[in-house]
Image: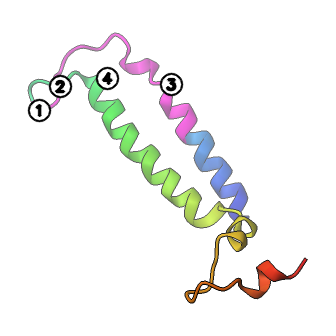
Amino acid sequence: MRNLCLLLLIAAVYVLHQDFWNWHQIEPLVFGFLPVGLAYHAGYSIVAALIMAVLVKFAWPAHLEKYERHESNGTKSEEETQP
């Protein structure tokens, strides 16, 4: 269920990236100087960064991390010594 929610979230962000409703809109300016399309993409970039953080938190493959863990005293861990 969690993977399905993450997949739907990615699909929603992908669809929102195609902001065809802002292509020909110049007015109004956001904060008095920023075009709407540029402001939209600035917000979109923040949302995309948050989505990436969520993906790292919940969808990162844990098996990749076992090769990076080392003991603090410099010796190999049991995971590294076993074939």
Q: What's the distance in space between the residues labelled 2 and 1, CA to CA?
A: 6 Å
Amino acid marked by disc 2: Leu
Q: Residues within 10 Å of mark 3 (few under 14, many from 20)?
A: few
**Label of residue 37 in the image:** 4
The three-letter amino acid code for the residue at tag 3 is Gln
Circle on res. 31: 1
Quadrant of the rendering where the C terminus is positioned: bottom right
Q: Given contact means CB atoms under 8 Å apart, are the residues at marks 1 and 4 in contact?
A: no
Give the residue type at disc 1.
Phe
Q: Are marks 3 and 4 in contact (CB under 8 Å)?
A: no
The residue to which callout 3 is attached is 18
Q: Residues within 10 Å of mark 1 (few under 14, many from 20)?
A: few
**Alpha carbon distance from label 2 to label 4:** 8 Å
Distance, label 1 to label 4, CA atoms, is 13 Å
Q: Residue at x 62, y 40 (%)?
A: 11
Q: Secondary structure at mark 1?
A: loop
Circle 4 Cα neighbour tier, 10 Å, few/some/many (<14 / 14–19 / ≥20): some
Name the residue carrying label 2: 34
Residue 22 lies in the magenta stretch: yes
| Residue that protrudes farthest toward the left in the picture | 32
